[in-house]
Image (tube, rainbow, N blue to C red):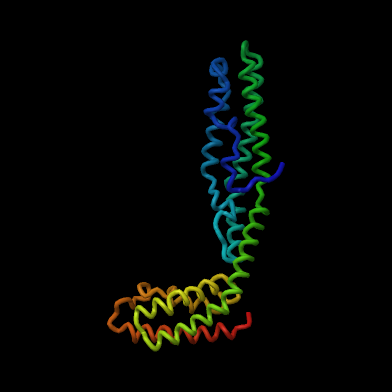
């Protein structure tokens, strides 16, 4: 069968594996016969709820880099080993219990419908066991890799222009170092550079540690908003940023 996306694990669970469904499907005759199947179905439901789908699916949230994606893959494999594999073993237990229940129901007068319900549980357990083994982790990872490649291409395209715009804005700002000028000439220009640096791993590795100190060029986070010495402090920050902008522009990544 085709693999399902890891994040669809819970919603892919067949209705026949829900205890409520089994209790209704086995009918009045089935309720008179103890099989232990309902208890095992309850265990499965609890185990399924404990699976962290965000960890199990590397594509559940965006990744900026292959390094970040690799970390998510490690977490996904661990989640599978510790949560999904035990779940598959429980499905084996359910399969056995369903077979036993079917035999009991068949040998009980008027138990034919209950036997069919037990058989349906067994078939659902087989189906879901294969589904759990066939999670499309590769497809999920490839989706993220494609997204990262697109982001990298866009960041590469925008970086040069962002550097030029910051340099031009900084020149205007230093001639008029006011909060209004910061908002017009520095804030967004600086953030554009930050976005590209954060995305491109070769630039990030070399420059991000120092460039992130500019806090996204937010005056509140930099603690210079409405400061009586705003002109002096902001000019100092912008000059430091220009030094790094020049280094980034000269970098051959």
| Residue found at the far top of this picture | 109
Q: Which quadrant holds residue 97? A: top right
- Residue furthest to the left in view is 228
Q: Could you tell me residue 213's position as x and y percent?
A: 44, 77
Please indicate, yes or no, whether residue 81 appears anywhere in the rendered image: no
Question: Residue 225 vs residue 69: left or right?
Answer: left
Vertical comparison of 149 with 130: above or below = below
- Residue 39: x, y in percent? 53, 29
User: Residue at 60% of width from left, 74% of height from top?
Assistant: 157
Residue 33 position within the rendered picture, expressed as x and y whole percent measured from the top left: 56, 18
Point out the image quarter for the C terminus: bottom right
The foreground one among 237 and 94 is 237
Q: Is residue 147 above or below residue 78?
A: below
Q: Quadrant of the N terminus?
A: top right
Q: Name the residue furthest right.
A: 1
Above or below 91: residue 218: below
Q: Position of residue 163 (x, y in %)?
A: 53, 80
Decide which of 185, 230 is in the foreground and name it: 185
Find residue 96 and report its image quarter: top right
- Quarter of the figure with residue 249: bottom right
Q: Toward the viewer: 184 or 220?
A: 184
| Residue at x-position 65% and y-position 31% | 95
Is there any visible trace of residue 231 in the rendered image?
yes
The residue under the point 58% across, 51% down is 56
Image point 61% across, 57% down: which residue?
73
Does residue 183 appear left or right of residue 154 in this picture?
left
């Amino acid at each position: 069968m085709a693999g399902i996306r890891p994040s669809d694990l819970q919603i892919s669970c067949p209705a026949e594996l829900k205890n409520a469904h089994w209790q209704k499907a086995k009918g009045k005759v089935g309720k008179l016969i103890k099989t232990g199947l309902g208890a095992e179905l309850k265990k499965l439901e609890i185990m399924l709820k404990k699976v962290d789908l965000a960890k199990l699916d590397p594509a559940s949230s965006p990744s900026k880099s292959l390094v970040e994606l690799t970390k998510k893959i490690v977490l996904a494999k661990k989640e599978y080993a510790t949560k999904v594999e035990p779940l598959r073993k429980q499905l084996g237990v359910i399969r056995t219990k369903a077979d036993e229940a079917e035999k009991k129901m068949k040998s009980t007068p008027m138990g034919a419908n209950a036997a069919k319900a037990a058989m349906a549980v067994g078939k659902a357990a087989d189906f879901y066991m294969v589904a759990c083994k066939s999670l499309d982790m590769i497809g999920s990872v490839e989706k993220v890799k494609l997204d990262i490649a697109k982001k990298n291409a866009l960041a590469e395209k925008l970086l040069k222009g962002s550097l030029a715009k910051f340099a031009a804005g900084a020149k205007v700002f230093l001639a008029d170092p006011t909060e209004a000028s910061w908002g017009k000439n520095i804030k967004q220009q600086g953030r554009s550079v930050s976005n590209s640096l954060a995305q491109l791993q070769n630039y990030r590795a070399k420059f991000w540690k120092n460039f992130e100190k500019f806090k996204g060029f937010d005056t509140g986070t930099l603690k210079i908003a409405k400061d009586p010495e705003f002109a002096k402090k902001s000019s100092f920050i912008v000059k430091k940023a220009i030094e790094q902008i020049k280094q980034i522009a000269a970098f051959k990544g």
